[in-house]
Image: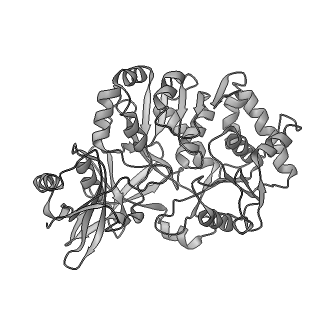
């Protein structure tokens, strides 16, 4: 089976059912199927063949869906580009993927396009209108590449993860089964479709289930309550920063939203336990946290029926195997921290045209995630942070997330990020960046840390900043944090 065949369950099987709300536009599944077919005809006329790449540099809109479905039918490899990227990042992706064209509403310099054509989405839709509303999809195998999604590149140049039809198929079927998503649901999606969270979870679960989707261009916290009360969703996919914003909703609005909801899901970044607890009190729902990556889509999930354990990402999804390994790749027992290895049909086919990086990422068929964590005795996994974020202080391993979770439980602290800074005696020491809720007493905060944290976990300094640098999915970009930023309140403590 390929994605076109899976999507036919809705695009043909539910052709008269309401499918999509995007801004003031409304579409049935049949209307979307016709739009995609027309676009596929046009792309083929413009010379795109199976295996060619098409870059799409657009914010969330129906044209993104048109182009994605057309690529799936044609066997063209879809390459989404983060809409926040600028010339340097776009140029790298275009040079690496070598697409025939880039679809964008923005003006892109010839040096960025590097010979690729620039196509405007409005012009494509207008020209596609003359073609038939049916397209005979290519008979693709499940192992055919469907998309190349580039990693965030926080530790170097972004790499293109090749995701196959089978990767996406398995992911969608797993989530529909484990989260009980059906055509009776109403999905509110604020996540960008250039990321696997929005594309692989949001778009695919919608098309596979036949539910009604309201697609937002982006999450606007000032309109969030209005969107919820107007659309009355039953399912919501988001990232932790969005849940932080939702906690600002008035109590009565939160109660009304919670009374209509069935499932709140969080991913793409760690969900602080304090947010989990506050949200459950305010909205009456335990957020379901799960764990995935660009290279693997979804790996684990807290159960839909059963205990949703805060600070954990649950258990492996069907068909997915996880191990916790030491630096030599040997299995570690429960409660012992190590690197997570993943194997299963969800794991990508490798990095685009990068054999060296692909070979380094796998060990005897297992993908080395670079994430550190441990497994409980009853099988729940906890992610402690990236291997590259690990701080070794005086020979002791320090996982920033533990300190961050503690700091965010303090009433004065809204957000926290902990990084390692070189130290001539201890090798590295933790430093905490804080976004305060208001006036903050750093001396009192330091005393609280001393009472509850081991001495080697005690932040050497606290740095108060207005905001933490984040990418489009809400992940803190720790590589942009520097030890002593200008105009930041800084307090040093000796541990």
- Tell me which corner region of the image, top left, top right, bottom left or bottom right, holds residue 6: top right
Q: Is residue 43 left or right of residue 315?
A: right
Near-viewer residue (204 or 164): 204
Q: Residue furthest bottom?
A: 424
Look at the picture and state if 491 lies above or below 210: below
For residue 365, say whether it is visible: yes
Q: Position of residue 210 (x, y in %)?
A: 62, 28
For residue 144, say whether it is visible: no
Near-viewer residue (154 or 220): 220
Q: Is residue 435 left or right of residue 152?
A: left
Q: Position of residue 466 (x, y in %)?
A: 35, 53
Quarter placement of the N terminus: top right
Q: Position of residue 26 (x, y in %)?
A: 68, 27
Q: Position of residue 21 (x, y in %)?
A: 63, 29
Q: Residue at x 88, y 38 (%)?
A: 131
Quarter placement of the C terminus: bottom left
Q: Is residue 377 left or right of residue 94?
A: left
Q: Residue at x 63, y 62 (%)?
A: 90
Q: Residue at x 55, y 64 (%)?
A: 158
């Amino acid at each position: 089976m390929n994605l076109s065949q899976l999507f036919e369950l809705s695009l043909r099987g539910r052709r008269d059912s309401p499918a999509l709300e995007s801004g003031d536009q409304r579409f049935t599944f049949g209307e979307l199927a016709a739009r995609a077919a027309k676009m596929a005809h046009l792309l083929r006329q413009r010379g795109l063949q199976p295996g060619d790449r098409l870059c799409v540099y657009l914010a969330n809109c129906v044209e993104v869906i048109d182009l994605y479905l057309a690529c799936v039918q044609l066997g063209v490899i879809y390459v989404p580009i983060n809409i926040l990227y600028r010339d340097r990042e776009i140029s790298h992706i275009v040079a690496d993927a070598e697409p025939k064209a880039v679809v964008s509403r923005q003006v892109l310099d010839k040096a960025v396009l590097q010979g690729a054509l620039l196509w405007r989405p409005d012009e494509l839709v207008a020209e596609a209108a003359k073609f038939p509303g049916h397209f005979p999809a290519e008979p693709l195998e499940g192992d055919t590449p469907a998309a190349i999604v580039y990693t965030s590149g926080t530790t170097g140049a972004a790499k293109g993860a090749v995701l196959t039809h089978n990767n996406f198929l398995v992911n969608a079927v797993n989530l529909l089964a484990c989260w009980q998503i059906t055509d009776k649901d109403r999905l509110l999606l604020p996540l960008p479709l250039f990321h696997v969270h929005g594309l692989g979870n949001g778009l695919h679960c919608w098309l596979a289930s036949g539910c009604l989707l309201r697609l937002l261009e982006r999450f606007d916290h000032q309109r969030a309550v209005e969107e919820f009360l107007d659309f009355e969703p039953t399912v919501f996919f988001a990232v932790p920063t969005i849940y932080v914003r939702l906690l600002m909703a008035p109590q009565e609005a939160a109660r009304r939203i919670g009374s209509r909801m069935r499932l709140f899901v969080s991913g793409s970044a760690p969900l602080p336990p304090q947010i989990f607890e506050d949200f459950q009190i305010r909205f009456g729902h335990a957020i379901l946290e799960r764990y995935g990556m660009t290279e693997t889509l979804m790996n684990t999930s807290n159960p839909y029926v059963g205990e949703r354990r805060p600070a954990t990402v649950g258990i492996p999804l069907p068909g997915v195997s996880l191990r916790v390994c030491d630096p030599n790749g040997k299995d570690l027992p429960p409660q012992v921290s190590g690197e997570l290895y993943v194997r299963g049909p969800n794991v990508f086919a490798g990095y685009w045209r990068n054999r060296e990086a692909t070979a380094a990422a796998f060990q005897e068929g297992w993908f080395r995630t670079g994430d550190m964590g441990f497994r409980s005795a009853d099988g729940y996994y906890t992610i402690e942070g990236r291997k590259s974020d690990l701080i070794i202080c005086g020979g002791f391993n320090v996982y920033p997330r533990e300190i961050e979770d503690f700091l965010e439980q303090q009433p004065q602290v809204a957000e926290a990020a902990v990084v390692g800074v070189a130290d001539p005696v201890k090798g590295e020491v933790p430093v905490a960046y804080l976004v305060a809720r208001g006036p903050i007493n750093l001396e009192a905060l330091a005393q609280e840390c001393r009472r509850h944290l081991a001495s080697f976990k005690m932040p050497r300094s606290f740095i108060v900043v207005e905001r933490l640098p984040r990418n489009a999915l809400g992940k803190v970009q720790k590589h942009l944090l520097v030890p002593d930023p200008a105009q930041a309140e800084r307090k040093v403590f000796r541990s």
